[in-house]
Image (cartoon, rainbow, N blue to C red):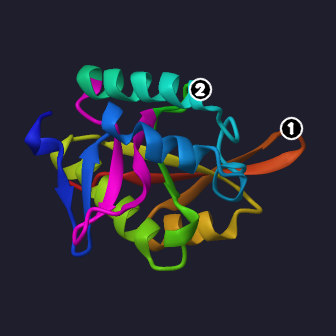
Amino acid sequence: MNQTWVVRTGRLVMRPVSYLDLPDLVALKGNPLVYAVMLGGVRSPLECAADLAEDIMFWGRHGVGMWAVREAAGEGFVGYVGLHGRPDGRGIALRFAVAAAGQGRGYASEAAGAALRFAHERAGLARVIAVARASNIASRQVLGGIGMVLHEAYMREGEEVLVYESLRVG
């Protein structure tokens, strides 16, 4: 693993996902309380393994990708955050999900903010988007809190979806 891709914050360490993270990702993505609101919804173990393979390849192709987020003290799994291409062609998107046990502690904002800074400052991305259902108030608060602004809205399967945007300054 490229050590320059490791990100540390005050409470967290974010490492590019690897196959060692698969059990934690299966638990996270298989939990409907966490993953039902994500693009594609709750994932089976087989789907998680396929997603992980794609995430690892994305790092190699683009120098950005998804991180496993762990507590700096103790290495407990917190969640999953990072950057990945949108299947609808809208661009590189910030994604995040925090395990149910870690929700309400500010981990999503801390990790998503660090990922966004990495995107602009270290990876040189001029534009990053994020997508959230209008009904997902928690995600919208995180996105606004890290400085992303509402860019557009569209309807998907009868539900309003909001696209947030962050542009690199300078």
Q: Earlier in the sequence, mark 1 or mark 2?
A: 2
Label 1 environment density (alpha carbons within 10 Å; few <14, some 14–19, many ≥20): few
Q: Quadrant of residue 70?
A: bottom left
Magenta segment range? 62-84
Tell me whether the residue at label 1 lies in contact with that at label 2, contact meaning CB atoms closer than 8 angstroms: no
Mark 1 lies on residue: 157
| Residue 72 lies in the magenta-colored region | yes
Quadrant of the rendered structure where residue 79 is?
bottom left
Q: Amino acid at mark 2?
A: Glu
Residue 116: x, y in percent? 33, 55
- Residue type at mark 1 is Glu
Q: In the displayed structure, would residue 52 be above or below residue 103?
A: above
The front one of 45 and 7 is 45
Could you tell me which residue is drawn at 48 percent across and 43 percent down? 25
In which image quadrant can residue 157 be found?
Answer: top right
The reply to whether residue 118 is visible in this rendering is: yes
- Main secondary structure along the magenta-highlighted residues: strand
Residue 135 image offset from top left, x and y in percent:
77, 62
User: Is residue 15 positioned above or below 20 on the image?
Assistant: below
**Label 2: which residue?**
47
Q: Residue furthest right?
A: 158
Where, quadrant-wise, is the C terminus in this rendering?
Answer: bottom left
Q: Give the spatial CA distance, label 1 vs label 2.
A: 22 Å
- Residue at horizontal 16 percent and vertical 46 percent from the top: 122
Residue at left 20%, top 55%? 7
Element at label 1: loop
